[in-house]
């Protein structure tokens, strides 16, 4: 099992929360899913977005401007939308290479906006079809941070839920964690924190039997599955509100956040004390990132 992780809002600029999101994809489904996404991309846009420097990321494809563009015209027929969208992207490429302004028509802008939203909807359809499971830690921007070199609670939460999911899948399923590459020093810090968590804590030692403690780092612009995690993180950040989450939402994002929420992992575990089962959810809200020992001593 592969667990692709990305984040939204960590720069603390416009986003209402910080979200660490992961998508779990079975190895046998991964390549088929990626091929299906590429097929949908060319069907909707007429071209591959990467050829025109358009990133497959939430802040690019689900920003407010996209919705404004899409609403400039009534829904266009798919064939006409594809042709206009391809022309729109071609003109943008010429403009970026030459530095000269290339006029584009209102229907081309509208076609591009509508195509993006159609693409996003069909990507979520494919994720459901290929049994992608969603996990996320949604963090208050005011949440206290660990004072030491402890693994933050949002990461520990994801690993815990991913471990439970692996147990549910089969008795011998193993998981590999794949992150969007950070600055090299940050990657080293995260690797060291994960190593201490998995090798030196009781819970971490148990979970290392299923999750490989050393993660992989990849370039997100070259790795579609990490970009899926980014889309999920962005959608949840702007569209999902759990208990105690009071930041405003963007109404237009809510259908996408609901799609992500519907794919969340939900399991059950028995209570060690009374044997009763209790639910396990793959998405949670956190208002404190410190480990229990640090919270107790405060």
Image (spheres, rainbow, N blue to C red):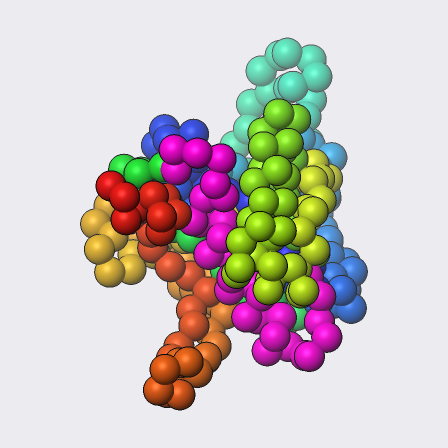
**As drawn, is 59 to the left or to the right of 32?**
left
| Camera-nearest residue between 253 and 12 | 12
Residue placed at 55% from the left, 70% from the top? 164
282 displayed left or right of 171: left
In this image, 70 relative to 210: left or right? left
Residue located 36% across and 37% down the image: 145
Q: Is residue 65 magenta?
A: no
Q: Is residue 129 above or below residue 189?
A: below
The magenta span reads: 146-175
List the single residue furthest toward the top. Answer: 99
Q: Nearer the viewer, residue 217 or 288?
A: 288
Give x and y (percent) for residue 188: 64, 32
The image quadrant that residue 68 belongs to is top left
Q: Quadrant of the N terminus?
A: bottom right
Task: Write the residue at 73% across / 53% down.
Answer: 38
Q: How many marks?
A: 0
Locate residue 98, reporting x and y percent: 69, 13
Q: Tell me the residue at 40%/88% (across/down).
A: 275
Query: Taking 104 as reference, is 32 left or right?
Result: right
Instruction: From the viewer's side, name the closer residue of 115 and 245.
Output: 245
Residue 253: x %, y % from top left: 38, 52
- The answer to whether residue 157 is magenta is yes
């Amino acid at each position: 099992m592969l667990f692709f992780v990305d984040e939204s809002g960590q720069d603390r600029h416009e986003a209402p929360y910080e979200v660490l999101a992961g998508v779990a994809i079975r190895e046998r489904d991964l390549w088929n899913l990626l091929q299906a996404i590429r097929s949908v991309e060319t069907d909707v846009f007429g071209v591959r977005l990467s050829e025109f420097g358009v990133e497959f990321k939430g802040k690019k494809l689900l920003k407010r401007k996209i919705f404004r563009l899409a609403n400039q015209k009534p829904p266009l027929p798919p064939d006409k939308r594809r042709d206009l969208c391809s022309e729109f992207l071609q003109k943008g490429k010429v403009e970026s290479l030459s530095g000269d302004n290339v006029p584009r028509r209102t229907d081309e802008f509208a076609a591009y906006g509508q195509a993006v939203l159609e693409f996003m909807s069909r990507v979520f359809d494919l994720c459901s079809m290929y049994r992608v499971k969603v996990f996320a830690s949604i963090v208050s921007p005011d949440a206290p941070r660990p004072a030491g070199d402890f693994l933050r609670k949002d990461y520990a939460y994801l690993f815990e839920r991913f471990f439970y999911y692996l147990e549910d899948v089969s008795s011998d399923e193993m998981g590999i964690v794949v992150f969007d590459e950070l600055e090299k020093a940050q990657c080293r810090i995260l690797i060291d924190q994960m190593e201490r968590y998995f090798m030196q804590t009781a819970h971490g030692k148990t979970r290392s039997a299923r999750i490989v403690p050393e993660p992989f780092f990849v370039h997100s612009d070259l790795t579609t599955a990490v970009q899926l995690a980014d889309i999920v993180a962005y959608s949840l950040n702007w569209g999902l509100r759990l208990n105690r989450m009071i930041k405003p939402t963007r109404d237009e994002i809510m259908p996408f956040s609901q799609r992500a929420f519907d794919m969340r992992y939900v399991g059950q575990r028995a209570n060690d004390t009374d044997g009763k089962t209790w639910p396990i959810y793959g998405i949670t809200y956190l208002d404190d990132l410190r480990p229990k020992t640090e919270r107790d001593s405060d």
